[in-house]
Amino acid sequence: MSRPTALLAALLVAVAAPPKIARSQGFIDRVKQKAKDRLNAKADSAADKGLDKLEGAIRCVATDKACIKKAQDAGKPVVVTDAKGNPLTDQPYAQQAGAASAAPSSTGAPGTGLWVNYDFVPGDSVIFAEDFTRDDVGEFPKRLELVSGNYEVAQAADGRYLRGTAIGYVKIPLGRTLPDRFTFEADMQVSPGGYVKLYLADPDKTDGIGYVQFNPTESGVKSPGTESTSAPAEDVNNTVFHARVMADGKHVKVYVNDKRVANAPSVNLGRSNELWLGLPGDENNPVLITNIRVAASARKLYDALAAAGRVATHGILFDTGSDALRGESTPTLTEIGDMLRQHPDLDLTIEGHTDNVGDAASNQSLSERRAAAVKQYLVTNYQIDAGRLTAKGYGASKPTAPNTTPEGRQMNRRVELVKN
């Protein structure tokens, strides 16, 4: 769901450029430090106002573990403050970890309204994930590479963004060649007339390949001889929207929030071990991007279950700190429901898992409620015998990857299906 332009514009903060003329390096350093101090004060004030808008949020002093636990047990977001009541820069509980998470988008239960024909399923093996929380505001992100242009990390109440204020490119090293089947996701804001372009290889070294484009009026796939684009279902000018790409070989689908804007059955995007992002902007109309997720897509759930006896999925999404299923869960829940109908001898244990962010007891409780919610959805909407399904929650006790990286935490927030 689009967030108000005015709020985001008020919250975005970047470190001011140093004076063009200075008498000495010491003077420059003092000026830069004063500028940072002023901007940090503005950021704190803006973040304070933005955090106040978190629905049902409870404020707790960072050292008051009892307050944090009570709020989490009630399924409420927690705004952590210092002893004077000022929100801290790091807000580990504002968005509670669960089996999966997603950026806000259109409301509605799975399988209803616009979600009926929604078919995006996120990849399950995370190759790259970045939300810039480990980068300093005003600096270029450590894990990206600058090709050209001007980019820096900016702070907003809802997180950190890469902010572009010039025409240029940044490069994302993946560490491996992108597979044929993969998904790409990101939250972004684009001004009227602007765009974000996604290339799967160096656009200057590979002839005949296409790219994915996102902008407020026309998003989709463009390549020599092939074009599949359309307008988003809602006005996303100067608002944050969720962008998605799902590729299977040369078949590429593109989504803006809950609408599929492109379905190209045969387009050559190429593959490499890096992604290129074209992010043109200026000071008055910056381009913003965050919550980047690139993941390899596995085989069908039933095939994986038959081969290994269990399968993890990251396509079941919940509201923050809640067991309420999000509409984006529709494709994965549909696949599970159809699988259970087609194989009446198949019994499953539904496991909820989290990362290690937040209180362990709260994560345990949340994972149990979310597993139970998935079971109930299948029983209610697909008439699956409840006796065929068992729901269990494990919190953060069974990680599949280290929780020390964004990729690891993404992998650990999951729902697993286990063949009984």
Image (cartoon, rainbow, N blue to C red):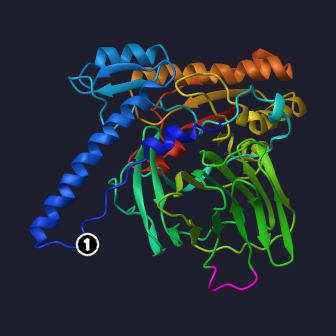
Image-based side of 239 in relation to 159, left or right = right
Q: Is residue 420 magenta?
A: no
Residue 90 seen from this side: yes
Q: Is residue 55 above or below residue 149?
A: above
Q: Nearer the viewer, residue 9 or 266?
A: 9
The kind of secondary structure element at disc 1 is loop
Bounds of the magenta segment:
203-208
* Residue under the image location 37 percent in, 54 percent down: 14
Q: Quadrant of the C terminus?
A: top right
Q: Is residue 361 above or below residue 195?
A: above
Where residue 191 appears, as percent x and y from the top left, is 61, 55
Q: Main secondary structure of the magenta part?
A: loop
Where residue 208 appears, as percent x and y from the top left, is 76, 83
Image-based side of 84 in relation to 279, left or right = left
The amino acid beneath tag 1 is Lys
**Extreme residue toward the right, this view:** 342
Give the class, few, some or many, for how many residues have Cα within 10 Å of label 1's Cα (few <14, many ≥20). Answer: few
Where residue 304 appears, as percent x and y from the top left, is 73, 47
* Residue under the image location 49 percent in, 18 percent down: 56
Where residue 415 appears, as percent x and y from the top left, is 62, 34
Q: Quadrant of the N terminus?
A: top right
Q: Which residue is mark 1?
A: 20
* Residue under the image location 55 percent in, 53 percent down: 292
Q: Is residue 207 magenta?
A: yes
Q: Nearer the viewer, residue 224 or 156?
A: 156
Residue 248 seen from this side: no
Image-based side of 74 in relation to 329, left or right = left
The mark tally for this picture is 1
